[in-house]
Image: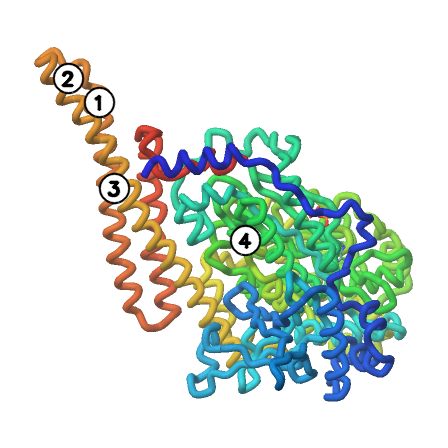
Amino acid sequence: MATNRFQALENVLDRKAKHTSAPSDKISNFYGEMVFNHNTMQEYLTDEAYRGVQDAMVEGKRLDRKIADQVASAMKEWAISKKASHYCHWFQPLTGSTAEKHDAFFFPIEGGRAIERFEGSMLVQQEPDASSFPNGGIRNTFEARGYTAWDPSSPAYVIGKTLCIPTIFIAYTGEALDYKMPLLKALHAVDQAATEVMQFFDKNVTKVNATLGWEQEYFLVDKALVAVRPDLAMTGRALFGHAPAKGQQLDDHYFGSIPERITAFMRDFETEALRLGIPVTTRHNEVAPNQFECAPVFEETNLANDHNLLLMDVLEKTARKHDFRVLFHEKPFAGLNGSGKHNNWSLATNTGHNLLSPGKTPKTNMMFLAFFINTLKAIHDHADILRASIASSGNDHRLGANEAPPAIISAFIGSQLTQVLDRLVANVKSEEMTPEDKMELQLNMGKIPQILLDNTDRNRTSPFAFTGNKFEFRAVGASANCASAMIALNTIMASQLRIFKNDVDHLIEKGNRKDEAILKVLRDYTVASENIRFEGNGYGEEWVEEARKRGLPNLKDTPRALDALIDKKNMALFEEVGVLSKVEMHARHTIELENYVMKLQIESRMIFDIAQTMILPAAIQYQTDLANNVNALNTLLGTEAKKGTVAQMQLIREIAEHIDGIKTNIENMLDERRKANAIKNVRDKSIAYCDKVKPYFEMVRKHSDKLEQLVDDDRWPLPKLREMLFTR
Ligand code: ADP
Ligand code: MG
């Protein structure tokens, strides 16, 4: 068996950088060429059809049948010109990845001939085999139907030989079975609420878009090495393996030139992404060895999220072409930096204004403060919803592990804005304000600097940081669909903005001038949300203690964090904002817990399997070698042998201890798993997996990682972490 590992390593060493197919052309010549975008639509559609699609895209109007047929026919014509032979509805089921149902344009007709066919009905709606996707009890088997329906706000594109149409995925009874549908609803709700609030400041604003700029982290490992690491292949993370002697302490990978194989891979995936209209600008960071990051320019949230999912797919496919495997797991290698997906978020008006950008005048600053303080209030009141939105078994390894924000939700705003808020609280009085108060306030509002010098990158330990002109939600996991976090954030923001509008209107009715009413409400919110602000080191133990005193929740594991989804007031909020019904929230809760249990089940099985069939045999064989050596020396030297076998005997005992440790722990783990599997209630089951099964993972690993340091390297069956991370 051991030879597998060395064969794999030889394969890696023999590899040459692949030839890249990246064109030498200017990027602007091929950017978006595989997208059915505005330009293409204008070229292929009649004016009437183009207007119809525009209305559907911008205002969510229904397309009539005739127009849908025209659009479908144009899309087909365009797609065939791009060499597509098939079309698919592309959707985002709650498994976490994306799914596609492919059909051919080809259609046989009489006389042994065929035509390429694609009609409006095929564009607008499809019925994939929905029974294979999680539904959390929404669909009974007799109604196991689900539909995908076209989302015209995200453009269709051609990838490979397929025309892909972004769609939502819903049950026969109308409930959402995906991430896209609630995301669109949350974005619509935040648009409406923010537009309403904007009437206080600028009546020209008729639409507000939530913007998203994500930063995707991932690891690359050679495919030959993954092939002989069943844990990586099956679970996306190394369940065994001693940390390499050289980890990221030296930080030299920051400066090292990116090896040729990886440069070739990057050029290829970037080209593919650019052709698909994903605005990747060349900006890569290496954080841990073999870890990389890609961050395109931000876009409207629904489009940005589709682009993230598409990019993950492109990364995976391109990695294969270059003999790599890409790992999106939040913590593939213990002891090294994990992978996150920062979500940069803001609100932008249709008049081109970023609402989280400090302005030039006291008036624009009041507008900035309104959206800024409302965000803090939303985070403060609904930290549990945000926490639940990023919960996953993978992210549990990362949150609070001294490299990623803790599981405690807090917000960082920097010292300048802290001062601004302090002054606001001091200057605004709840009673009638004097002219002096107002004057001072005006002065202070005018002093908010447009560029916040102490902000941006200064505090990397906060899960929710204000970075100059946007908030950065840093606790999102690398493998997650950003929609989950974006649904949560935009929903609580929509709710908060509605409350704000009401509170201000109420004070105006009571005779306050508009500006004074706004300032008074903002002052109250600032005081009420103070607890959520934390400027110190989010990784420190003191913060955990301080947060406890402040009464902020610290939910370290997924099953408990997910409770927020079925909390009565949270369900009421989601229903009121019109994003998810109680039935849908319950279903999501169930599905997330099922996903969690499934992931841990697979990991536990892999641990048993690898420990029993790979690690124990290697350790026992080496122990036998040692025992044979002791025996031989005894025969040869008789009583004199005693001294010469001390080290061997010591090793034999140490190895025996760890063999025993592994065997006992995997058997106990199996017992706990059997007990957990017998539990019917999915929440109880997930808690059993979390509290009773999972602790064995670490115990088994500890013994195995010790053995890795004792057993003859030639006999060790699994590629070591240092080999996976430093062999390219
Ligand atoms: P880092 O966190 O690594 O310092 P940058 O400051 O370079 O990252 O930018 C992070 C991301 O924030 C980029 O993807 C950028 O497009 C995005 N971003 C910038 N402005 C906004 C905005 N108004 N809304 C959403 N995302 C934004
Ligand atoms: Mg960032």
Disc number lying in front (3 or 4): 3
Disc number lying in front (3 or 1): 1
Q: Which mark is residue 633?
A: 2
Tell me the distance, in whole angstroms, between the alpha carbons under discs 3 and 4: 38 Å
Q: Of residues 303 and 37, which is closer to you in this image?
A: 37
Q: Position of residue 429 (x, y in %)?
A: 79, 65
Q: Residue at x 27, y 46 (%)?
A: 612
In the rendered structure, the answer to whether residue 8 lies left or right of residue 674 reads right
Q: Amino acid at mark 3?
A: Gly
Which residue in the rendered view is the most extreme toward the front? 111
Tell me the distance, in whole angstroms, between the alpha carbons under discs 3 and 1: 20 Å
* The CB of the residue at mark 3 lies under 8 Å from ligand 2: no
Tell me the distance, in whole angstroms, between the alpha carbons under discs 3 and 2: 29 Å
Q: Residue at x 46, y 42 (%)?
A: 224
User: Local crowd at mark 3 within 10 Å, few (<14), some, or many (≥20)?
Assistant: some
In the rendered structure, the answer to whether residue 359 lies left or right of residue 573 reads right
Disc number lying in front (2 or 1): 2
